[in-house]
Image (cartoon, rainbow, N blue to C red):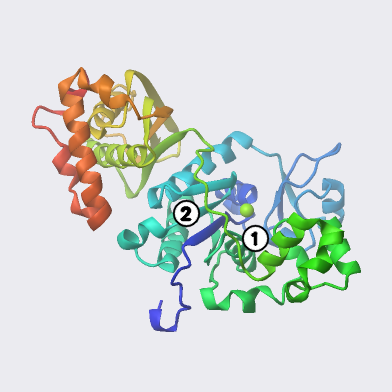
Amino acid sequence: MDRAGAPDDTGCTILHVDMDAFYASVELRDRPDLADQPVIVGHTGGRGVVLSANYLARGFGVRSAMPVGRAARLCPRAVFIAPRHDLYAAVSREVMAIFRAITPAVEPLSLDEAFLDVSGALRRLGPPAAIGAQIRRQVSEQLAITCSVGVAPTKFVAKLASVHCKPDGLLVVPADGVLEFLHPLPVAALWGVGERTAAVLARLGLRTVADLAHAPVAALEPELGRAAAAHLSALAWGRDERAVVPRAREKSVGAEETFGTDIGDQEAIRRELLRLAGRTARSLRSSGLAARTITVKLRRSDFSTITRSRTLAEPTDVARTIYAVACDLHSSSGLRPGERLRLVGVRATGLTPAAGLGTQLRLGERPDAWRAAEGAMDKIAGRFGTGAVAPASLVDPAGPGAAAG
Ligand SMILES: [Mg+2]
């Protein structure tokens, strides 16, 4: 996109990323035949409610949390699909992994949305809007679903921005455009304004965010209480001090790669495992974590998937160790030689804080040395981008088994 014509994203370091119609979109990957039909995910019968509806179904007025009976009356042609929660959780982990490869400052709000503070990634990845575009591209290419990204100086404006550009969009609200964006919205758009608060505000004649902004806080206090009055007034002026609070909702860290064309060559697969082990170790170290269990995921051309795990004697955040285990798991996975893969993944679980780990590792000299070396490379990568550190620098001539002990 022409940067000259793009909105100014200076200081817009908060991203809110939200998958579009998440469950329905995940189901549609397996049912391309339904792409042109209204699709609703939810248990039919009884007291089932709509968990997710694609945009065709929403066109009929179908909404999340609506009883399925009502949804069926609104949209008789809709195809109902029973939910597969394990699948959504697995895809969610992949979504969060994409986010965490961008920055460790990821605050998940649910399975399919999160805040990201990208201020630490600007040097490496470019301005916030470019990072948002990169996330959208990766989600689409790797997971075959779409998402929407709000880019703003604060959390709540970023969240409103992603709502505004749904589905499959990206919206930058420039720092000097926040009030222009915010003020025409209904008060209910503000975070924390539910039906009851909205009713109170309506009684005071306050319908838009601009109305609320211009109301004296003293006039709001008797109705809302001091804290809420001050908070809502601040929001109405675009002020929101809340920081992105990194949380590991899923207690795992990892990376995976979907290939442009499926690969069967063992060396190529090992090279990929090396790269993914490096990425996994880097995200561990950047979160100050170490992992007790390493898992590899190997997905064949026909989408059937093998996962193999091993729990280590000592937790690690060292790429060489992770790589050695991953290679071992790969060679003992039962894949036929030359069998083609469309995706390879490495995942670390059983996470513990890495603090204090150095003392344990000092007992074995080599891992400590590697740990120091890899830590130094993190610093270089942080300054010049990960491309500055060739993954080949992790390869030991002694071979992948050397670091396993
Ligand atoms: Mg969503």
Q: Amino acid at mark 2?
A: Val
**Label 1–label 2 contact, CB within 8 A:** no
- On screen, residue 300 above or below 129: above
**19 sits left or right of 106 in the view:** right
Percent of width and height locating residue 295 = 38, 28
Percent of width and height locating residue 321 = 25, 28
Disc 2 target residue = 139
Percent of width and height locating residue 101 = 38, 48
Image point (84%, 38%), residue name: 45
Image point (30%, 21%), residue name: 332
The image quarter in which residue 333 lies:
top left
**141 sits left or right of 123 in the view:** right
From this viewpoint, is residue 160 visible? yes
- On screen, residue 395 above or below 228: above
Q: Amino acid at mark 1?
A: Asp
Q: Is mark 1 within 8 Å of ligand 1?
A: no
**Circle 1 sits in a helix, a strand or a loop, which is it?**
loop
**261 sits left or right of 191 in the view:** left
